[in-house]
Amino acid sequence: MSGRLGMSGRLSVSGRLGVSGRLGVSGRLGVSGDDRRARAEGGRSTSRGRRAALVAAALAVTLGLTGTLGASAAPGASAASGTSAAPSATPTTDDPFAPGPQHRRLDPLVGTWKATKYNWLLGKDGEVVVSHDFRVKVRWIEKTGGRFMEERTEGTLAGRPYFRTGVLGYSNIDKRFEWTTFDSVTPTAMTYRGAPDTGGSHEISIPGEFTDPGILGPEFQGRSIPMRTVIRIESANRHTLDMYFTPPGQEERLVDRVEYRRVGKG
């Protein structure tokens, strides 16, 4: 309560209440001329009663303004000293909404690329199918706050037009890389969710699962297949992306590799 509280023009209360655990009335209550005359006339009981009434009135006003007794009305004030508390320290945890160091690990992927694709699933009798005409563009999606990047790939695979779009990012909440793709070959989304990863390696491994539409053979159609994408950043101008499948009852095996060579920055 700042300044004076005018109780019949006489009560002078400064600062605030509740300093050092007692009612913060500065010095003494401003006693009116009537009180002095009452004291002179020997009416001490009257003075004490009036003084108590004034204190009660001040207390009632203070409770009405702050809702508490013995608490400072100023935000951040110390009840013991009457001074403002120091600002709270900067939070030690990272802002979950802001891109962080793990997002920066993906920066070398941004740009325009020429890529060669090797696929061990589409050829006959395990023969590798090679495509040399892949064109890839990767960019951060600004409208996501720079938390996710988009990859768009076009080319020819096994003599047929091929297209893929994917979104790659890092979850500050789950501490993992996340990668989802949609392409012209697979009739389902390929979704990967990595294990917690906070390191600084140039290799990023992101596991996932998909329901096989029959590309591994009729015996696996409709079954859940563990898979894994491994991104290896060799330099600012070259990286590879490997895909592994682990069919039930079999060991993990490489099924697809794409080698990227930079041709432009954006």
Image (spheres, rainbow, N blue to C red):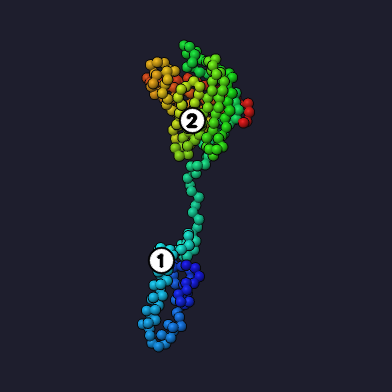
Above or below 75: residue 46: below
Question: In the drawing, what numbered circle is on residue 179?
Answer: 2
Q: Earlier in the sequence, mark 2 or mark 1?
A: 1
Above or below 172: residue 205: above
Write down the quadrant of residue 220 in the picture. top left
Question: How many numbered discs sit on the rendered protein?
Answer: 2
Above or below 182: residue 81: below
Residue to which mark 1 is pinned: 63
Classify mark 1: residues with Cα within 10 Å, few (<14), some (14-19) or many (20+).
some
Residue 124 is at least partly visible in this image? yes
- Observer-nearest of 171 and 8: 8
Q: Identify the residue shown where x is 49% and y is 13%.
A: 123
Q: Identify the residue shown where x is 47% and y is 20%.
A: 255
**Helix, strand or loop at mark 1:** helix
- Observer-nearest of 25 and 162: 162
Residue 20 is at least partly visible in this image? no
**Helix, strand or loop at mark 2:** strand
Q: Position of residue 260 (x, y in %)?
A: 57, 24
Q: Position of residue 252 (x, y in %)?
A: 43, 21
- In the displayed orientation, state which residue is furthest to the right: 264
Question: In the drawing, what numbered circle is on residue 201?
Answer: none
Q: Identify the residue shown where x is 48% and y is 60%.
A: 75
- Observer-nearest of 109 and 46: 46
- In the displayed orientation, state which residue is furthest to the top: 125
Q: Position of residue 13 (x, y in %)?
A: 46, 72
In the picture, measured across the screen, residue 196 lies left or right of residue 240, that is left
Q: Position of residue 150 (x, y in %)?
A: 54, 31
- Observer-nearest of 256 and 30: 30
Classify mark 2: residues with Cα within 10 Å, few (<14), some (14-19) or many (20+).
many
